[in-house]
Structures are given as structure tokens and as C-alpha cells.
Image (tube, rainbow, N blue to C red):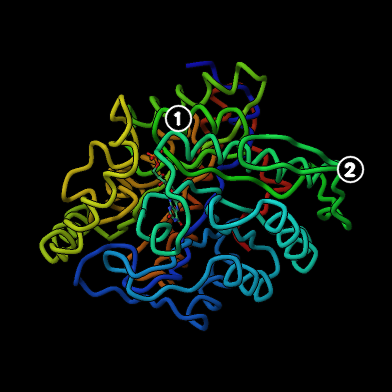
Amino acid sequence: MPELAPAHFETPLKFAYWVPNVSGGLVVSTIEQRTSWDFDYNKKLARIAEDSGFEYALTQTRYAASYGADKQHEATSFSLALLGATDRLKVISAVHPGMWHPGVLAKFVITADHISGGRAAVNIVSGWLKDEFVNFGLPWLEHDERYVRTEEFIRVLRGLWTEQEYSQAGKYYNITDFTLSPPPVDVPGRPHPEIFFGGNSTAAQAAAGRVADWYFSNGKDLEGFKDNIAGVQASASEVGRTPKFGLNGFVISRESESEAKDTLREIVEKAHRPAVEGFAAAVKEAGQSTKDGKGMWADSSFEDLIQYNDGFKTGLIGTPEQIADRIIEFKKIGVNLFLTAYLHFQEEVADFGKQIIPIVREKEAELARANGTELNLEDSQTAAA
Ligand SMILES: Cc1cc2nc3c(=O)[nH]c(=O)nc-3n(C[C@H](O)[C@H](O)[C@H](O)COP(=O)(O)O)c2cc1C
């Protein structure tokens, strides 16, 4: 693993939360989840989040009922509405290449960016839920081919956001002399709306390294995350890019470690078994379907899949102090951002901001000093208001 630059230790970790825009909460379990997928709940949550030190929210894209998510709000429109309801939060909308033409999406995001003063972002996801594509009558590409299309898709987005009279000839898209006017908002230090990328297989990592600004990983332990970083950096370094890294984690922060573990146990005991098993079958379309069998959910147990992005593996479960320690362990190996989920979003996002972020900041300051530099909170949006 390449050594981390001093800038890594100077830059505070960023925090994001999963927008619960699909029903059923973020765990497929009948345990009580004080959360809701409706807009009013989400509007309040977004405001709480930006006042609690969260810089980003990530909206999910889902078109059809699936494993505990019977109802869904569409991601790009929901994201735009959340941008309208907030002042500082950056809202990342998940989008599937294959459902969108990249030129149409590029234009949509520019408009969202102008409406929000430069806070629009996208998470490009290549998809696993085959029925959504097949039942819409859209082509369902073989696994690695999905990433060929994704890579082209992202190149079109970036090209149209940064160049005039942009042309790109490829297998999936042909763009000729196209200028989008206006361009995205000119935000210092941001060449264009940020491009996140979710995918874990070998093909995903290779593509992300070449084109993504941010690589999002499903929940991982320390070793698992090191593997992910290595895979992405190997392809990024070939083209001189340095993507940043986001890691998913399900947070169970309680006064005592045993209380937190009891909550995890209850989530598992009350798992919605048929839904989790259905999900386990459907995700075989992801990395497991490839030659090397690597990828998201490829080594996930029944318990892991109850949080459908493997969020228990990250181990953000315990007291605030323990969770802050764990977060720092991940920062030491290169994580730049934590993507978090909760049972009771509004209350727990606020608690995370009050109880965990301040400890993380203290520990980050120590870590920075140990690495011969200082933590720079100055122009960070992440300092809690
Ligand atoms: C942080 C993150 C968010 C994701 N969000 C979505 C989503 O909203 N909708 C979706 O269909 N897939 C989503 N995915 C799944 C990806 O589409 C992809 O199927 C998955 O990462 C499997 O990748 P692999 O086949 O390369 O292992 C997400 C993945 C990650 C890591």
C-alpha cells in the first residue's frame, strides 16, 4: 500500500448518511426502526444532518420492490428536493448507467448544481437487480460488460461538465461536438460535480481507479478495506489519478458495549429471513458471477446481508469512544469518508454529531501530530455547527 501523504492527515474525515428513500429502513429486520422513507421525515433528517457535522447524504436508486424495500422514491428528484431543503449538505444521487443517457444526466445535474449553489453529486452504480432492467425491457449486460459501459458513461459526464464541443466515440455512447451551457457551478477546488462510484468486484475497482473521484466500498473489516484500496489504486496509478475512499458502516452507538452488541443480536434474531434469502439469491448477479468470483456480497454471511451493504462488517458498534477509535483505525489505512446508517436515523444522526464526531476530531488531531502535521478544520464543512 502506498504511504499516505501528509494531506491525508491534515484533512478531516467526512461523514455521510444513507438517505432512507426506500421503505423498510436500512436493515431487513422486524426490529423497531424509527425511520421513514417519506419526504417530510427526510427533509427534517437532512437538516439535522447538516447541523450535526455531516457533509453528504447519499440517495439510493431503486425502481422495483425488493427485499424489504417495498416502496421507493426516485433518487434524482428526491436528491434535488433535499438540496432545496438544505443550505450546506451535498446530496449524492445514485444513478444507473443503462437507465439514463449520460448527456441527459449531465444536464440534469448541472441544473441541480445551479439550484443548490454547487452541491450536486452523483454515485454511479452499475446495478445488480436484474429484474429492474429486464422488466423495463432494457438490456441486462453481463457483469464485467456493465463496467465497460459505466466507464464510458463517466467519461461522457466529465467531458460534458468540463469541455466545450465535447466529442466521444465509444461502444455505448457517441457524443458529437456537444456543449452544455451553462456549465456546472464554479466551486473552488471542485473541477465538476463529484463522481462517486459504488462497486466491489475486480472490474469495478479497475474502472473506478481510472475514472471515479470517490470509490465507495461496502462495509469491510480493516483487511478487506486494504484489499479494496489496493485494487483501486493499482489502476488509478497507471493513469496518474488519486481517487478518495468512502466506506459504509452501520452505526450502533450505545452507552455500553454490551448494549450495542445486544442491539445487533436483536437485529439478527428478528431478521426477515425470506427477504434476506431472496436478496442473497439476487446479488449473485454481482461480483459472484465473475470469473474470479470476487466482489460485493461474494463473502457475505446471512448476518452480513441483513444490512444490505454489509455495514456490520465495518464494526462501528459499541460506545462512542470505541466507534471513534475504530474510525481512526480506518483513517490510518486511507479512508476519507464514512457513509453511515442507523436504526433510528433522526435521533442517531444527531447523536453521532454530538457524541462521536468531537471524539473523532480530537483523535484525528493527535494522529495528524503523530504524522508531523496539523489537522486543518478551518475551511471544513464538517465542523459541527
Ligand atoms: C455505497 C454503494 C451504494 C450503492 N447504491 C446502489 C443503489 O442505490 N442502487 C443499486 O441498484 N445498486 C447500488 N449499489 C450496488 C452497485 O450497483 C453494484 O451492484 C454493487 O456494488 C456490486 O458490485 P460488484 O458487482 O462490482 O461487486 C451500491 C453500491 C455501493 C458500494
Q: Which residue is mark 2?
A: 165
In front here: 113 or 8? 113
Image height check: is 196 above or below 57? Answer: above
Residue at the location (68% across, 57% down)?
A: 105
Residue 209, image quadrant? top right
* Residue 121 in sight in this render: yes
Image height check: is 198 above or below 89? Answer: above
Q: Earlier in the sequence, mark 2 or mark 1?
A: 2
| Ligand 1 closer than 8 Å to label 1 CB | yes
Give the residue type that dot 1 points to. Ala
Q: Secondary structure at mark 2?
A: loop
Q: Secondary structure at mark 1?
A: helix
Residue at the location (21% across, 51% down)?
A: 281
Q: Residue 139's spot in the image, x, y percent? A: 46, 51
Q: Tell me the crowding category of disc 1: few under 14, some 14 to 19, or many 20 or more residues within 10 angstroms, Cα based.
A: many
Is 184 on the left-hand or right-hand side of 348? right
Q: Which residue is mark 1?
A: 203
Give the residue type that dot 2 points to. Glu
The number of numbered badges drawn on the structure is 2
Q: Residue 182's spot in the image, x, y percent? A: 88, 58
Q: Tell me the crowding category of disc 2: few under 14, some 14 to 19, or many 20 or more residues within 10 angstroms, Cα based.
A: few
Q: CA distance from mark 2 to mark 1?
A: 30 Å
The C terminus lies in quadrant: bottom right
